[in-house]
Image: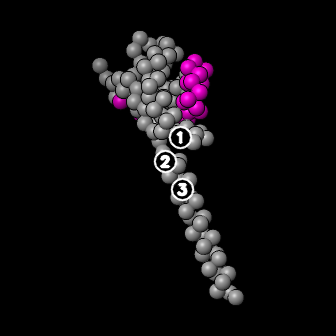
């Protein structure tokens, strides 16, 4: 039996919406903090879901991530209930640090721009 190709995209979107809600409203663990689900990739048979997360305003995102990973079974159980299915996809959380990398690159570019501007100002004197 072939799966609907749009089914994985629909399921990914639904999971991306439900997981932060589950963590915030159902689990309420302050050590996890505010979770942002950046992307969800579901395999073709819908048995596995890779969930890319980041933590908004977290000082120690790796600690938040470790706490989230320890709650994986509970998240999957609640997800199953909310999806109305007997068996939800196996969840693998992935810490998405792309926003941190982009932010540090942006800071480096601004510093370089300021350095160049100050050099240009010195040359004009």
Rounded to the nearest whole Å, what is the CA distance between mark 3 and mark 1?
Answer: 16 Å
In x, y percent, where is residue 18?
A: 54, 24
Rounded to the nearest whole Å, what is the CA distance between mark 3 and mark 2?
Answer: 10 Å
Instruction: Single out the mark in the foreground, 3 or 1.
Output: 1
Quadrant location of the N terminus in the rendered image? top left
In x, y percent, where is residue 48?
A: 36, 26
Ranked by sequence position, the earlier of labels 3 and 1 is: 1
Disc 3: CA contacts within 10 A as few (<14), some (14-19) or many (>=20): few
Q: Is residue 21 above or below residue 118?
A: above
Q: Residue at x 60, y 64 (%)?
A: 110
Disc 1: CA contacts within 10 A as few (<14), some (14-19) or many (>=20): few
- Counting labels gives 3
Report the residue marked by disc 1.
60
Magenta range is: 23-43
Q: Residue at x 58, y 59 (%)?
A: 107
Question: Do tag 3 and tag 2 residues touch (Cβ < 8 Å)?
Answer: no
Ranked by sequence position, the earlier of labels 1 and 2 is: 1
Q: Residue at x 70, y 88 (%)?
A: 125
The label on residue 104 is 3
In the rendered structure, does residue 61 fall within the stretch colored magenta?
no
Q: Is residue 54 above or below residue 92?
A: below
Ranked by sequence position, the earlier of labels 3 and 2 is: 2
The answer to whether residue 50 is seen in the rendering is yes
Judged from the image, the secondary structure of the residue bearing numbered disc 3 is helix
Report the residue marked by disc 2.
98
Instruction: Single out the mark in the foreground, 3 or 2.
Output: 3
- Residue 104 lies in quadrant: bottom right
The answer to whether residue 21 is seen in the rendering is no
Rounded to the nearest whole Å, what is the CA distance between mark 1 and mark 2?
Answer: 15 Å
Judged from the image, the secondary structure of the residue bearing numbered disc 2 is helix
């Amino acid at each position: 039996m072939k799966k609907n190709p749009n089914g994985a995209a629909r399921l990914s979107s639904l999971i991306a919406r439900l997981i932060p809600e589950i963590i915030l409203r159902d689990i309420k663990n302050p050590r996890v903090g505010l979770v942002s689900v950046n992307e969800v990739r579901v395999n073709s048979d819908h048995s596995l879901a890779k969930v890319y997360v980041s933590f908004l305003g977290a000082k120690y995102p790796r600690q938040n991530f470790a706490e989230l990973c320890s709650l994986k079974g509970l998240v999957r159980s609640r997800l199953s209930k909310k999806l109305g299915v007997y068996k939800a996809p196996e969840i693998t959380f992935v810490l998405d640090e792309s926003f941190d990398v982009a932010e540090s690159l942006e800071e480096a570019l601004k510093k370089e721009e300021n350095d160049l501007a100050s050099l240009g100002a010195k040359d004009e004197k």
